[in-house]
Each structure stands twice: as C-alpha cells, then as structure tokens.
Image (cartoon, rainbow, N blue to C red):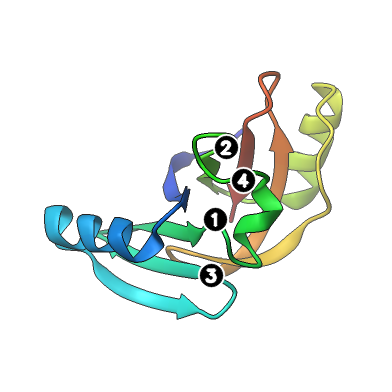
Amino acid sequence: MFDSVHLDHIVLRAKDAKALSAFYIKVFECEVERELPIGLIQLRLGSILIDIIDADSELGLQGGPRPGAGRNLDHFCLKVEPFKEEDIIEHLRNCGVKFEPLRELYGADGYGPSIYFYDPEGNKVELKG
C-alpha cells in the first residue's frame, strides 16, 4: 500500500519539559525547531522531530494525568508515501479500525495530511503524508 514508511516524530509528555528538552539537546545535539505557548517544544534530530509536551500545559492536560500516573508517550507518527487519503481510509475501514477525521498538521517535513487511530492496546498512531 505504501512505497515508503519512516518515523516522522515522537511525542513525549514531561513533568519538566525544559529539563527533558535540555537532555535531548545535550545528548543528541538537537536544535529547537519551534516552541509554542500551548506547552510544546519541538526538537529537530536529523529528519525527525522530538516533541516534548509540558504535562501541566494546555496541550499536556489532554493526555491525562502527569507522567508516572498516566501516559508518557502521547503517540507515534509514521510518514507514509504515497498518502492517498481515499485508499488509506478504505483500508482502515476494511481492517475495522476506527479513525479520526483527516487534519492538516505540522511534522518533521512541515505541514501535511494526518490521520489518527488507536491500536488494540490503546496506543495512538498517526499516519502522515
């Protein structure tokens, strides 16, 4: 169905987003790509993004309790090519997968179409074009 698939970004919820960001900047020599007032710090690591969300921020509170009592990994994102919306939706429906409506979101390669769904264990997965 796809010619290529690679990791686009990973999203981590943090008790101390600044300290976690500093860790990734130091260990992997990431650079800050964007910092948004909703509690999101996006770090560039080669072709991928490491998104760090302050668990107590507007965005972080959407993930439930702080890390340690709830989810730490918000979701993972797979970049798929080609991204044929109709084919992907039909395939997910045929597999019995419930999914969220397509949205235009920012990832490692900029803005593009994204579809979210959950695996049987409750992990959130994003397919991104």
Residue at which label 3 appears: 39
At 60% from the left edge and 58% from the top edge, which residue is drawn? 60
Please state if 120 lies on the left or on the right of 111 as rendered.
right
Q: Marks 4 and 3, Cα distance to the nearest angstrom?
A: 23 Å
Q: Amino acid at mark 4?
A: Leu
Q: Marks 3 and 2, Cα distance to the nearest angstrom?
A: 16 Å
Q: Marks 4 and 2, Cα distance to the nearest angstrom?
A: 20 Å
Residue at which label 4 appears: 127
Residue at which label 1 appears: 55
Residue 37, numbered circle: none
Q: Amino acid at mark 3?
A: Gly
Neighbor class of circle 4 (other Cα within 10 Å; few <14, some 14-19, many 20+) is many
Please state if 89 lies on the left or on the right of 13 as rendered.
right
Upstream in sequence: badge 3 or badge 2: 3
> Up-down: is 61 above or below 31?
above
Upstream in sequence: badge 4 or badge 2: 2
Residue at which label 2 appears: 71
